[in-house]
Image (spheres, grey):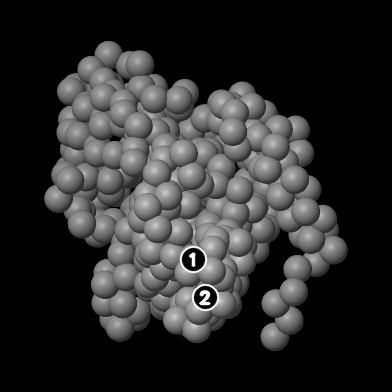
Amino acid sequence: MDLSLSWEQQQLKETLDRLVAEKTAGDWRALWRKLAELGVLALPLSEAAGGAGGTAVDAMVVMEALGRGGAVSPYLAAAVLAGGLLDAAGSPAQREALGPALASGEGLVVLAHGERAARYDLAHVATGATRRGGDWVLNGRKDVVPWADAAGRLIVSARVAGPAADRDGIALFLVDPRAAGASLRPYPTVDGHRAADLMLEGVVVSESDAMGEPGRALPAIERAVDRAVAAASAEALGAMAALYEMTLAYAKTRRQFGQTIGQFQVVQHRLVDMFVAVEMARSMAALAALAADRADPAERARDVSAAKAQIARAARFVAQQAVQLHGAVGMTDEYPVGRYFKRLTVLETLFGDADFHRRRFAAS
């Protein structure tokens, strides 16, 4: 199997590597505008939604570059995850209204699905949606919604009552975070990104804001999350590769006991183990990207979970080794190793940790 990038993908990778290196120190909005100008925000969206109809491999190229540069960006939450749901479950009118704005960088849409007791179970939704005339009324809470305070629209999952509940029972609704009854508690996350808790108290949404058929949204959510897992795996790969390169360079210059620490055999062994972990993660990230676009949910789940389990394990190992080999400076916020460590810690558990995906793999 040929896993090499196409000429266009290689050119995209090189362009993004240069862009991220220039923009990571500034406001995330500046990087977001640049990504929009390059057409990168349009890649995950289908042509029907005003996008470029890119594949999961294209998303892998983008996310690896963002991970390598340590970029703070809502690309995963908005372009990949919410964009995928907009394509899968949105009506033509919804795609026409939100897709071009998302692709141009003028509008941000994110998914509000996670709940405190869910523990990675996508079918666990306690937020309720009830009919009231021709509208829906939402009540509940969503926790750690990524980039919610920067979004113009939220895709909120809720469990419906009545005839629709005999299916999977989950519906998706477009919600204005400034609507009556909706409130956000925003905060920075440990890795420098943004999140918020969303409270819904009698929030009224119209029938036109329902995405797809109410009560049958779970397959679309699972497919979008699998694609997001593949993209997050690529970001973790980029961060791991950057950590390995920084640690190798540090070992060649840091002197101790009259010689560089890279001359000590025990340090050389650790560097080799880091290199092997990164290369194994590279293969598994490619597997996840190729599997994410499969239509068969069982095959997709098996390969995506296999990749996430391996990459989560590799991310912890590489991050810990990088910090230990750098010593105390590796724990500081001013030095990039500490920032990469924090982002990899988040990515390790995002959409399910290694134990969860091993169980999912075994059950598929």
Q: Position of residue 249 (x, y in %)?
A: 61, 62
The type of residue carrying mark 2 is Leu
Badge count: 2
Q: Residues within 10 Å of mark 1 (few under 14, many from 20)?
A: few
The correct choice, above or below, for 364 with respect to 12 in the image is below
Which mark is first along the chain, 2 or 1?
1
Q: Residue at the location (56% across, 77% down)?
A: 263
Nearest to the observer: residue 49 or residue 301: 301
Q: Residue at the location (48% across, 69% down)?
A: 257
Q: Is residue 165 visible?
A: no
Q: Marks 1 and 2, Cα distance to the nearest angstrom?
A: 17 Å
The correct choice, above or below, for 242 with respect to 32 in the image is below
Q: Residue at the location (26% across, 58% down)?
A: 120
Quarter of the view holding residue 310: bottom left
Q: Position of residue 303 (x, y in %)?
A: 46, 77
Q: Residues within 10 Å of mark 2 (few under 14, many from 20)?
A: many
Q: Which residue is mark 2?
A: 271
The type of residue carrying mark 1 is Gln
From the image, which quarter does the N terminus lie in?
bottom right
Which is closer to the viewer, label 1 or label 2? 1
Nearest to the observer: residue 335 or residue 4: 335
Q: Position of residue 222 (x, y in %)?
A: 39, 59
- Mark 2 element type: helix
Q: Residue at the location (30% across, 83% down)?
A: 362
Q: Farthest residue in the top direction?
A: 180
User: Left of 120 or right of it: where is 110?
Assistant: right
Q: Which residue is mark 1?
A: 256
From the image, which quarter does the C terminus lie in?
bottom left
